[in-house]
Amino acid sequence: MKRAFIIATGTELLLGNTADTNSDFIARQLIQAGIKVIGRIIVGDQQEEIMAAFSLGTQLADIIISSGGLGPTRDDLTKETACEVMGVELEIIEEEAVKLKEYFARRQRKMPASNIKQAMFPREAIILANRCGTAPGMYLYKDEKTLIVLPGPPHEMERMFLDEAEPLLREKLKLTDSRALSQVIKVFGPGESQVEEMLAEIIDDPRGCSLALLAEKGEIHIRITAEGTARQESQKILGEIRKRVIMAMGDNVYGYDDDTLISVVTGLLQDKGLILATAESCTGGYLSKMMTDLPGSSASFWGGAVTYDNTAKNKLINVKDDTINTYGAVSEETAREMAAGIKEVAGSDIAVAITGIAGPEGGSDTKPVGLVYIAYLSDGEEKVYQLRFNSHRKGNRILAVKSALDILRRHLQGR
């Protein structure tokens, strides 16, 4: 099995201001292609650090893939440094220089002189087209090592990897019949330690597979990988352990691989021809945002009301003052009236309402920070759930929204 080492460059990644989603994406794609990821590293924009990372990668792996540092500025040094480690010279490739000049001409802008470095590559390299930006990538094979250099912006990197780099990897390394296969099973409900307990028997006896658990903002992602002597055997092994994991996790499984709670819920709503409306207090419209992040969601999502203040609850969705005065804004009764109010206003098939105390202030002994009520209302069913989270403000809001989506999923699946 080929071994890969992933390098992410950029000081912003080290400072914690930007998450390294590029390496996550690349790792998932490599594993699906039957390539073992043996290491990942993040380095800043200093040349000596970048050089050390590429030197380590060439020592440990067959394939070295980097993202970031392909821009025109002085601190964009990834390509130059990687080529120095690989022992190849850069030169201006006229065809790439023309493409760069045309790019700026189309935008009626003068091309800065520094941008010409984006047209410099070794003659031995295959240039990877960037259809979303100005910085091309590079594929280089030398001394039994494969080097792939990709841009940093995630939308540019992902498109380039899928359209350019991955097909080359499969072709050049003959990965069309990879033995290794993997799948991610996504779970919402139990925590990581609970999932580990539920899977204890499988973890102790994986039968030719490996399992890895990843906690992801309230979700647990279970990656199972099988490597048989041939692809057909790997498929059989993967299928068997997949059944065992699903049986152990039950209806806590909400999806697989690229599925998200939003995509699963939206798919169920559309399949059933149902329209959803939402009313939110403590989550401030975050559920509506997540619904509308998905293209085409207007087919199943009417919209929502952010009724943060009690007056908004009363005037926009008809929550009674008596209800709030008697039971409080954070209560089962208020959540129920919020759902009923938005359903009436929208004329929707389903309504979901969220009210709670996100924190860090506002809690009490009887209603602590993290207390959330989620109401579900359809033409044939009504239920209010009381949940308690123990996170910070942002975490409590995310968990509340994901819990609402999971409640929706379970109702729509008849569970």
Image (cartoon, rainbow, N blue to C red):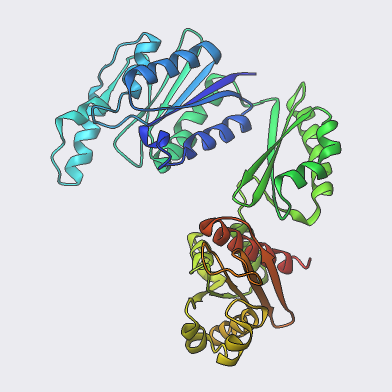
- Quadrant location of the N terminus? top right
In the image, taking residue 294 as reference, residue 273 lies left or right, namely: right
The front one of 199 and 234 is: 199
**Outermost residue toward the front?**
365
Q: Look at the picture and state if 362 lies above or below 107.
A: below
Displayed quadrant of residue 79: top left
* Residue at the spot 47% in from the left edge and 85% down from the top edge: 311
Q: Percent position (x, y) of residue 363?
A: 57, 68
Q: Look at the picture and state if 292 lies above or below 349.
A: above
Displayed quadrant of residue 211: top right
**Outermost residue toward the left?**
110
Q: Look at the picture and state if 299 lies above or below 250.
A: below
In the image, taking residue 392 as reference, residue 267 lies left or right, namely: right
The front one of 299 and 171 is: 299
Q: Percent position (x, y) of residue 159?
A: 44, 40
Q: Percent position (x, y) of residue 385?
A: 70, 71
- Quadrant location of the C terminus? bottom right
Q: Percent position (x, y) of residue 133?
A: 32, 40
The front one of 342 and 360 is: 360
Inspect this view and state whether residue 240 appears.
no
Inspect this view and state whether residue 293 appears.
yes
* Residue at the spot 58% in from the left edge and 35% down from the top edge: 28
